[in-house]
Image: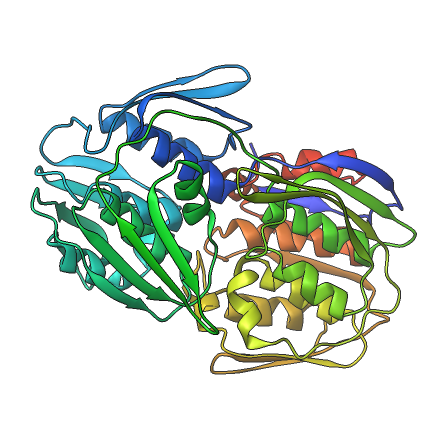
Amino acid sequence: MKKFLLINKKINSFNKSIGISGDKSLSIRCAIMASQAIGTSKIFNLLNSEDVNNALIAIRKLGIKVIQKKNYCEIHGNGLNGFSFRENTKINAQNSGTFARLILGVVAKTNKKIVLKGDKSLSNRDFTRVIEPLNKFGMKINSKNNKLPLKVLGTKYLRPIDYVELKGSAQVKSCILLAALNTPGITKIKCKPSRNHTELLFKFLKLNLNIKKKNKYDLITLKGEKQYRGFNYRIPGDISSASFFIVLTLLSKNSKLILKNINVNKTRTGIIDVLKKMNAKILLRNRREYKGEQISDIHVYSSNNLKCIKCPKDFNSRLIDELPLIFLACAKAKGTSYFQNLDELRHKESDRLKLSSKFLKMIGIKNIVNKNSFMIKGNPNLSLSKNFIVKNFMKDHRIFMLSCIAAMALGGKWKIYDKDSINTSFPKFLKTIEELGGIFK
Protein backbone atom coordinates (compact mmCIF):
# COMPACT_ATOMS: atom_id res chain seq x y z
CA MET A 1 0.00 0.00 0.00
CA LYS A 2 1.42 3.40 -0.98
CA LYS A 3 2.25 5.75 1.86
CA PHE A 4 1.43 8.99 0.05
CA LEU A 5 -1.65 10.74 -1.22
CA LEU A 6 -2.07 12.43 -4.60
CA ILE A 7 -4.38 15.44 -4.93
CA ASN A 8 -4.65 17.02 -8.38
CA LYS A 9 -7.88 18.96 -8.15
CA LYS A 10 -9.51 21.50 -5.88
CA ILE A 11 -12.72 20.56 -4.16
CA ASN A 12 -15.95 21.77 -5.78
CA SER A 13 -18.39 23.96 -3.87
CA PHE A 14 -20.43 22.04 -1.30
CA ASN A 15 -23.44 22.47 0.99
CA LYS A 16 -23.36 19.62 3.48
CA SER A 17 -24.06 18.55 7.04
CA ILE A 18 -21.56 16.10 8.58
CA GLY A 19 -20.58 14.49 11.85
CA ILE A 20 -17.06 14.39 13.29
CA SER A 21 -15.35 11.62 15.26
CA GLY A 22 -15.32 11.71 19.07
CA ASP A 23 -13.14 14.19 20.94
CA LYS A 24 -9.66 12.70 21.46
CA SER A 25 -8.89 14.57 24.68
CA LEU A 26 -12.15 13.43 26.26
CA SER A 27 -11.84 9.89 24.92
CA ILE A 28 -8.46 9.41 26.63
CA ARG A 29 -9.61 11.04 29.86
CA CYS A 30 -12.86 9.03 30.03
CA ALA A 31 -10.97 5.78 29.50
CA ILE A 32 -8.52 6.67 32.27
CA MET A 33 -11.26 7.71 34.71
CA ALA A 34 -13.31 4.58 33.94
CA SER A 35 -10.29 2.41 34.72
CA GLN A 36 -10.21 3.81 38.27
CA ALA A 37 -13.96 3.75 38.93
CA ILE A 38 -15.70 1.05 40.94
CA GLY A 39 -17.73 -1.08 38.54
CA THR A 40 -18.66 -0.82 34.88
CA SER A 41 -18.51 2.30 32.69
CA LYS A 42 -19.95 2.57 29.19
CA ILE A 43 -18.37 5.14 26.88
CA PHE A 44 -20.23 5.89 23.66
CA ASN A 45 -18.66 7.45 20.54
CA LEU A 46 -15.17 6.76 21.88
CA LEU A 47 -12.69 7.85 19.22
CA ASN A 48 -11.35 4.83 17.32
CA SER A 49 -7.80 6.06 16.76
CA GLU A 50 -4.28 4.85 17.52
CA ASP A 51 -3.87 7.25 20.46
CA VAL A 52 -7.07 6.08 22.13
CA ASN A 53 -6.58 2.40 21.28
CA ASN A 54 -3.07 2.52 22.76
CA ALA A 55 -4.58 3.97 25.93
CA LEU A 56 -6.98 1.00 26.09
CA ILE A 57 -4.09 -1.44 25.56
CA ALA A 58 -2.21 0.16 28.45
CA ILE A 59 -5.26 0.03 30.72
CA ARG A 60 -5.59 -3.69 29.98
CA LYS A 61 -1.93 -4.12 30.94
CA LEU A 62 -2.79 -2.56 34.28
CA GLY A 63 -5.27 -5.40 34.88
CA ILE A 64 -8.47 -3.65 33.77
CA LYS A 65 -11.09 -5.51 31.72
CA VAL A 66 -11.98 -3.61 28.52
CA ILE A 67 -14.66 -4.82 26.09
CA GLN A 68 -15.19 -2.93 22.83
CA LYS A 69 -18.75 -3.46 21.63
CA LYS A 70 -20.49 -2.22 18.49
CA ASN A 71 -21.88 1.01 19.92
CA TYR A 72 -19.78 1.61 23.02
CA CYS A 73 -16.69 0.65 24.99
CA GLU A 74 -17.20 -1.12 28.32
CA ILE A 75 -14.53 -0.66 30.99
CA HIS A 76 -14.64 -2.58 34.27
CA GLY A 77 -12.79 -0.56 36.89
CA ASN A 78 -11.50 -1.81 40.24
CA GLY A 79 -11.48 1.52 42.06
CA LEU A 80 -8.59 3.81 42.95
CA ASN A 81 -5.27 1.98 43.02
CA GLY A 82 -7.08 -1.13 41.78
CA PHE A 83 -4.47 -2.06 39.18
CA SER A 84 -2.63 -5.37 39.01
CA PHE A 85 0.43 -5.91 36.83
CA ARG A 86 3.87 -7.43 36.73
CA GLU A 87 7.19 -5.85 37.61
CA ASN A 88 8.65 -3.78 34.74
CA THR A 89 5.36 -3.63 32.86
CA LYS A 90 6.00 -1.76 29.62
CA ILE A 91 3.46 0.86 28.59
CA ASN A 92 3.82 2.22 25.06
CA ALA A 93 2.12 5.59 24.55
CA GLN A 94 3.24 5.58 20.87
CA ASN A 95 2.54 9.15 19.63
CA SER A 96 0.22 10.41 22.38
CA GLY A 97 1.72 13.08 24.63
CA THR A 98 -1.63 13.39 26.39
CA PHE A 99 -1.83 9.74 27.39
CA ALA A 100 1.87 9.50 28.25
CA ARG A 101 1.68 12.39 30.69
CA LEU A 102 -1.69 11.50 32.19
CA ILE A 103 -0.88 7.83 32.81
CA LEU A 104 2.13 8.90 34.89
CA GLY A 105 -0.28 10.52 37.36
CA VAL A 106 -2.53 7.45 37.37
CA VAL A 107 0.27 5.07 38.44
CA ALA A 108 1.60 7.36 41.17
CA LYS A 109 0.70 4.92 43.97
CA THR A 110 1.92 1.70 42.39
CA ASN A 111 4.82 -0.06 44.07
CA LYS A 112 6.12 -1.97 41.06
CA LYS A 113 8.39 -0.58 38.38
CA ILE A 114 6.83 0.57 35.11
CA VAL A 115 8.60 1.50 31.88
CA LEU A 116 6.89 4.19 29.81
CA LYS A 117 8.01 4.50 26.19
CA GLY A 118 6.78 6.04 22.94
CA ASP A 119 7.50 6.38 19.25
CA LYS A 120 10.38 8.40 17.76
CA SER A 121 8.45 11.67 17.82
CA LEU A 122 7.23 11.34 21.42
CA SER A 123 10.67 10.17 22.56
CA ASN A 124 12.11 13.53 21.46
CA ARG A 125 9.76 15.47 23.73
CA ASP A 126 10.79 16.75 27.15
CA PHE A 127 8.88 15.31 30.14
CA THR A 128 10.44 17.62 32.74
CA ARG A 129 7.17 19.48 33.20
CA VAL A 130 5.46 16.39 34.67
CA ILE A 131 8.49 14.72 36.25
CA GLU A 132 9.06 17.70 38.59
CA PRO A 133 5.61 17.70 40.26
CA LEU A 134 5.45 13.89 40.39
CA ASN A 135 8.78 13.80 42.22
CA LYS A 136 7.26 16.15 44.78
CA PHE A 137 4.46 13.62 45.36
CA GLY A 138 7.18 11.06 46.22
CA MET A 139 7.48 9.14 42.95
CA LYS A 140 10.84 8.12 41.50
CA ILE A 141 11.29 8.64 37.77
CA ASN A 142 14.58 7.89 36.03
CA SER A 143 15.44 8.75 32.44
CA LYS A 144 18.07 10.18 30.13
CA ASN A 145 17.58 13.95 29.77
CA ASN A 146 13.99 13.63 31.05
CA LYS A 147 12.89 11.95 27.83
CA LEU A 148 11.28 8.60 27.09
CA PRO A 149 11.77 5.85 27.98
CA LEU A 150 11.03 6.61 31.64
CA LYS A 151 11.56 4.13 34.47
CA VAL A 152 8.78 4.84 36.94
CA LEU A 153 8.31 3.74 40.54
CA GLY A 154 5.34 4.98 42.53
CA THR A 155 4.93 4.95 46.29
CA LYS A 156 2.19 3.97 48.74
CA TYR A 157 3.14 7.03 50.77
CA LEU A 158 2.16 9.83 48.40
CA ARG A 159 2.12 13.30 49.92
CA PRO A 160 -0.08 16.18 48.73
CA ILE A 161 1.69 19.11 47.08
CA ASP A 162 1.29 22.79 46.29
CA TYR A 163 2.33 23.47 42.71
CA VAL A 164 2.53 26.47 40.39
CA GLU A 165 2.00 25.62 36.69
CA LEU A 166 3.17 28.51 34.50
CA LYS A 167 2.87 27.15 30.94
CA GLY A 168 -0.90 26.79 30.67
CA SER A 169 -0.52 23.05 30.03
CA ALA A 170 -3.66 20.93 30.47
CA GLN A 171 -1.49 17.81 30.35
CA VAL A 172 0.56 18.92 33.37
CA LYS A 173 -2.51 20.03 35.31
CA SER A 174 -4.32 16.77 34.56
CA CYS A 175 -1.30 14.66 35.49
CA ILE A 176 -1.12 16.40 38.87
CA LEU A 177 -4.87 15.99 39.46
CA LEU A 178 -4.73 12.28 38.65
CA ALA A 179 -1.83 11.80 41.07
CA ALA A 180 -3.66 13.86 43.69
CA LEU A 181 -6.75 11.68 43.26
CA ASN A 182 -4.74 8.80 44.76
CA THR A 183 -3.12 10.96 47.45
CA PRO A 184 -4.41 11.57 50.98
CA GLY A 185 -4.91 15.19 51.93
CA ILE A 186 -5.38 18.30 49.81
CA THR A 187 -3.30 19.12 46.72
CA LYS A 188 -3.28 22.71 45.49
CA ILE A 189 -2.49 23.94 41.97
CA LYS A 190 -2.07 27.54 40.86
CA CYS A 191 -2.14 27.45 37.07
CA LYS A 192 -2.73 29.40 33.91
CA PRO A 193 -6.13 28.63 32.33
CA SER A 194 -6.04 25.71 29.87
CA ARG A 195 -8.28 22.86 28.69
CA ASN A 196 -10.53 21.88 31.58
CA HIS A 197 -11.93 18.49 30.48
CA THR A 198 -10.34 16.77 33.49
CA GLU A 199 -11.88 19.23 35.96
CA LEU A 200 -15.32 18.87 34.36
CA LEU A 201 -15.07 15.07 34.55
CA PHE A 202 -14.05 15.31 38.21
CA LYS A 203 -17.08 17.52 38.91
CA PHE A 204 -19.40 15.18 36.99
CA LEU A 205 -18.09 12.29 39.13
CA LYS A 206 -18.63 14.39 42.27
CA LEU A 207 -15.00 14.33 43.38
CA ASN A 208 -13.72 16.76 46.00
CA LEU A 209 -12.57 19.44 43.54
CA ASN A 210 -12.77 23.19 44.04
CA ILE A 211 -11.81 25.87 41.50
CA LYS A 212 -11.43 29.60 42.16
CA LYS A 213 -10.94 31.68 39.03
CA LYS A 214 -8.71 34.70 39.44
CA ASN A 215 -7.85 37.35 36.87
CA LYS A 216 -5.00 35.52 35.12
CA TYR A 217 -4.92 32.10 36.78
CA ASP A 218 -6.98 29.37 38.44
CA LEU A 219 -6.61 28.08 41.99
CA ILE A 220 -7.53 24.38 42.09
CA THR A 221 -7.74 22.21 45.20
CA LEU A 222 -8.46 18.48 45.32
CA LYS A 223 -8.96 16.29 48.37
CA GLY A 224 -7.81 12.85 47.32
CA GLU A 225 -8.76 9.23 47.85
CA LYS A 226 -12.48 9.58 47.21
CA GLN A 227 -13.81 6.51 45.41
CA TYR A 228 -16.39 6.90 42.64
CA ARG A 229 -18.60 4.53 40.70
CA GLY A 230 -18.70 3.54 37.03
CA PHE A 231 -20.49 5.91 34.68
CA ASN A 232 -21.98 6.32 31.21
CA TYR A 233 -20.65 9.01 28.88
CA ARG A 234 -21.21 9.98 25.24
CA ILE A 235 -18.19 11.69 23.67
CA PRO A 236 -19.08 14.76 21.53
CA GLY A 237 -17.35 15.59 18.23
CA ASP A 238 -13.77 16.88 18.35
CA ILE A 239 -13.35 20.62 17.68
CA SER A 240 -9.72 20.05 16.65
CA SER A 241 -10.82 17.61 13.93
CA ALA A 242 -13.75 19.83 12.95
CA SER A 243 -11.35 22.76 12.51
CA PHE A 244 -9.86 21.30 9.33
CA PHE A 245 -13.27 21.44 7.69
CA ILE A 246 -14.06 24.87 9.11
CA VAL A 247 -10.99 26.26 7.34
CA LEU A 248 -11.65 24.22 4.19
CA THR A 249 -15.14 25.76 3.99
CA LEU A 250 -13.86 29.30 4.57
CA LEU A 251 -11.28 28.98 1.79
CA SER A 252 -13.58 27.22 -0.72
CA LYS A 253 -15.91 29.11 -3.04
CA ASN A 254 -19.69 29.20 -2.55
CA SER A 255 -19.72 26.59 0.19
CA LYS A 256 -21.60 25.99 3.41
CA LEU A 257 -21.02 23.35 6.07
CA ILE A 258 -22.84 22.26 9.23
CA LEU A 259 -20.77 20.26 11.73
CA LYS A 260 -23.08 18.40 14.11
CA ASN A 261 -22.69 17.84 17.87
CA ILE A 262 -19.25 19.40 18.34
CA ASN A 263 -17.63 20.03 21.72
CA VAL A 264 -17.38 23.83 21.97
CA ASN A 265 -15.86 23.97 25.45
CA LYS A 266 -14.59 27.56 25.81
CA THR A 267 -11.05 26.34 26.49
CA ARG A 268 -11.02 24.74 23.00
CA THR A 269 -12.75 27.31 20.75
CA GLY A 270 -9.94 29.80 20.28
CA ILE A 271 -9.89 29.01 16.56
CA ILE A 272 -13.51 30.12 16.20
CA ASP A 273 -12.85 33.36 18.07
CA VAL A 274 -9.77 34.13 15.97
CA LEU A 275 -11.43 33.33 12.65
CA LYS A 276 -14.41 35.52 13.57
CA LYS A 277 -11.98 38.37 14.27
CA MET A 278 -10.66 37.71 10.76
CA ASN A 279 -14.16 38.32 9.37
CA ALA A 280 -15.20 34.66 9.02
CA LYS A 281 -18.90 33.83 9.21
CA ILE A 282 -19.19 31.04 11.77
CA LEU A 283 -22.35 30.48 13.81
CA LEU A 284 -22.96 28.23 16.82
CA ARG A 285 -26.50 26.87 16.88
CA ASN A 286 -28.45 24.36 18.97
CA ARG A 287 -26.19 24.94 21.96
CA ARG A 288 -26.65 22.76 25.03
CA GLU A 289 -24.75 21.44 28.04
CA TYR A 290 -23.73 17.82 28.56
CA LYS A 291 -22.16 16.84 31.89
CA GLY A 292 -20.38 20.18 32.09
CA GLU A 293 -19.25 20.30 28.46
CA GLN A 294 -20.77 22.69 25.92
CA ILE A 295 -22.07 21.07 22.72
CA SER A 296 -23.19 22.86 19.54
CA ASP A 297 -23.72 22.57 15.80
CA ILE A 298 -21.23 24.77 13.93
CA HIS A 299 -22.41 26.54 10.75
CA VAL A 300 -19.59 27.76 8.48
CA TYR A 301 -19.77 29.81 5.25
CA SER A 302 -17.24 30.62 2.52
CA SER A 303 -15.37 33.88 2.95
CA ASN A 304 -13.93 36.11 0.22
CA ASN A 305 -12.72 38.86 2.51
CA LEU A 306 -10.70 37.45 5.40
CA LYS A 307 -8.61 40.10 7.12
CA CYS A 308 -5.34 39.86 9.02
CA ILE A 309 -5.12 39.56 12.78
CA LYS A 310 -2.81 40.43 15.63
CA CYS A 311 -3.61 37.38 17.70
CA PRO A 312 -3.91 38.03 21.46
CA LYS A 313 -1.24 35.93 23.18
CA ASP A 314 -3.67 34.79 25.87
CA PHE A 315 -5.58 32.91 23.14
CA ASN A 316 -2.69 30.49 22.55
CA SER A 317 -3.67 27.83 25.10
CA ARG A 318 -7.18 27.72 23.57
CA LEU A 319 -5.99 27.05 20.02
CA ILE A 320 -2.54 25.50 20.25
CA ASP A 321 -3.39 22.47 18.07
CA GLU A 322 -5.24 24.60 15.52
CA LEU A 323 -2.56 27.26 14.97
CA PRO A 324 -1.20 25.76 11.71
CA LEU A 325 -4.74 25.92 10.28
CA ILE A 326 -5.09 29.53 11.41
CA PHE A 327 -1.77 30.29 9.71
CA LEU A 328 -3.22 28.84 6.49
CA ALA A 329 -6.26 31.10 6.80
CA CYS A 330 -3.90 34.07 7.35
CA ALA A 331 -2.13 33.13 4.11
CA LYS A 332 -5.28 34.15 2.24
CA ALA A 333 -6.17 37.14 4.41
CA LYS A 334 -5.65 40.79 3.52
CA GLY A 335 -2.71 42.34 5.36
CA THR A 336 -0.04 41.06 7.74
CA SER A 337 -0.90 38.84 10.71
CA TYR A 338 1.15 38.59 13.91
CA PHE A 339 1.42 35.87 16.55
CA GLN A 340 3.62 35.75 19.64
CA ASN A 341 4.54 33.50 22.59
CA LEU A 342 4.43 30.39 20.40
CA ASP A 343 6.99 28.38 22.36
CA GLU A 344 4.49 25.56 23.05
CA LEU A 345 4.03 25.08 19.31
CA ARG A 346 7.63 23.85 19.12
CA HIS A 347 6.94 21.06 21.62
CA LYS A 348 4.17 19.13 19.87
CA GLU A 349 4.56 16.02 17.69
CA SER A 350 6.93 18.13 15.61
CA ASP A 351 8.22 21.71 15.70
CA ARG A 352 5.00 23.01 14.20
CA LEU A 353 6.18 26.62 14.13
CA LYS A 354 9.17 25.72 11.99
CA LEU A 355 7.14 23.41 9.73
CA SER A 356 4.33 25.95 9.34
CA SER A 357 6.82 28.60 8.23
CA LYS A 358 8.38 26.18 5.75
CA PHE A 359 4.95 25.18 4.45
CA LEU A 360 3.78 28.76 3.87
CA LYS A 361 7.00 29.65 2.07
CA MET A 362 6.51 26.60 -0.16
CA ILE A 363 3.11 27.93 -1.30
CA GLY A 364 4.50 31.43 -1.88
CA ILE A 365 3.54 33.20 1.36
CA LYS A 366 6.14 35.47 2.93
CA ASN A 367 6.59 34.95 6.65
CA ILE A 368 9.14 35.58 9.37
CA VAL A 369 9.83 33.54 12.49
CA ASN A 370 11.59 35.49 15.23
CA LYS A 371 12.28 33.15 18.16
CA ASN A 372 8.68 32.32 19.18
CA SER A 373 6.79 34.99 17.23
CA PHE A 374 5.42 34.67 13.70
CA MET A 375 4.54 37.22 11.02
CA ILE A 376 2.53 36.21 7.94
CA LYS A 377 1.98 38.46 4.92
CA GLY A 378 -1.32 37.34 3.42
CA ASN A 379 -2.38 37.18 -0.23
CA PRO A 380 -6.17 37.29 -0.74
CA ASN A 381 -5.70 36.19 -4.37
CA LEU A 382 -3.67 33.11 -3.46
CA SER A 383 -4.26 30.29 -5.96
CA LEU A 384 -1.90 27.40 -6.63
CA SER A 385 -1.04 25.57 -9.84
CA LYS A 386 2.48 24.17 -9.23
CA ASN A 387 3.56 20.72 -8.11
CA PHE A 388 4.12 20.29 -4.35
CA ILE A 389 5.69 17.49 -2.33
CA VAL A 390 5.18 17.33 1.44
CA LYS A 391 7.36 14.91 3.42
CA ASN A 392 9.82 14.73 6.31
CA PHE A 393 7.43 16.25 8.83
CA MET A 394 7.96 13.69 11.64
CA LYS A 395 4.73 11.96 10.55
CA ASP A 396 2.82 14.72 12.35
CA HIS A 397 -0.86 13.99 11.66
CA ARG A 398 -1.86 17.66 11.78
CA ILE A 399 0.74 18.67 9.18
CA PHE A 400 -0.53 15.93 6.87
CA MET A 401 -4.14 17.08 7.24
CA LEU A 402 -3.13 20.74 6.86
CA SER A 403 -1.49 19.86 3.52
CA CYS A 404 -4.66 18.13 2.32
CA ILE A 405 -6.82 21.13 3.22
CA ALA A 406 -4.44 23.49 1.39
CA ALA A 407 -4.52 21.27 -1.70
CA MET A 408 -8.32 20.99 -1.70
CA ALA A 409 -8.88 24.71 -1.12
CA LEU A 410 -6.08 26.36 -3.11
CA GLY A 411 -5.33 24.00 -6.01
CA GLY A 412 -2.06 22.67 -7.38
CA LYS A 413 -0.84 19.10 -7.75
CA TRP A 414 0.21 17.55 -4.46
CA LYS A 415 2.06 14.46 -3.31
CA ILE A 416 1.68 14.20 0.46
CA TYR A 417 3.55 11.47 2.34
CA ASP A 418 2.73 9.52 5.51
CA LYS A 419 -1.02 9.35 5.04
CA ASP A 420 -1.20 6.72 7.79
CA SER A 421 -0.36 9.47 10.30
CA ILE A 422 -4.08 10.37 10.46
CA ASN A 423 -4.71 7.12 12.34
CA THR A 424 -3.25 8.85 15.39
CA SER A 425 -6.20 11.21 15.85
CA PHE A 426 -8.67 11.20 12.94
CA PRO A 427 -8.79 7.98 10.90
CA LYS A 428 -11.98 9.12 9.15
CA PHE A 429 -10.38 12.34 7.85
CA LEU A 430 -10.08 11.25 4.20
CA LYS A 431 -13.51 9.64 4.23
CA THR A 432 -14.95 12.96 5.45
CA ILE A 433 -13.22 14.80 2.59
CA GLU A 434 -14.86 12.34 0.19
CA GLU A 435 -18.26 13.09 1.78
CA LEU A 436 -17.75 16.73 0.74
CA GLY A 437 -16.83 15.77 -2.81
CA GLY A 438 -13.04 15.84 -2.56
CA ILE A 439 -11.09 13.57 -4.92
CA PHE A 440 -7.67 12.08 -4.29
CA LYS A 441 -5.64 9.03 -5.23
Give 128 or 207, whichever is nearer the viewer: 207
Residue at 65% over, 60% down = 271
Quadrant of the image containing the N terminus: top right
- Colour theme: rainbow
Q: Is residue 133 left or right of residue 254?
A: left
| Above-or-below relation of 219 to 289 | below
| Above-or-below relation of 90 to 410 | above
The total of numbered circles placed on residues is: 0
| Above-or-below relation of 70 to 324 | above
Q: Position of residue 180 (x, y in %)?
A: 24, 49
Residue at 28% over, 63% down = 129
The residue sitting at the right extreme is 254
Q: Is residue 358 left or right of residue 283?
A: left
Q: Position of residue 19 (x, y in %)?
A: 70, 34
Q: Position of residue 266 (x, y in %)?
A: 59, 56
Q: Is residue 181 left or right of residue 27?
A: left
Residue at 51% over, 37% down = 423
Give 355 or 168, whichever is nearer the viewer: 168
Give 297 or 2, whichever is nearer the viewer: 297
Give 219 or 122, whichever is nearer the viewer: 219
Q: Position of residue 421 (x, y in %)?
A: 51, 43
Residue 103 visible in the snapshot? yes
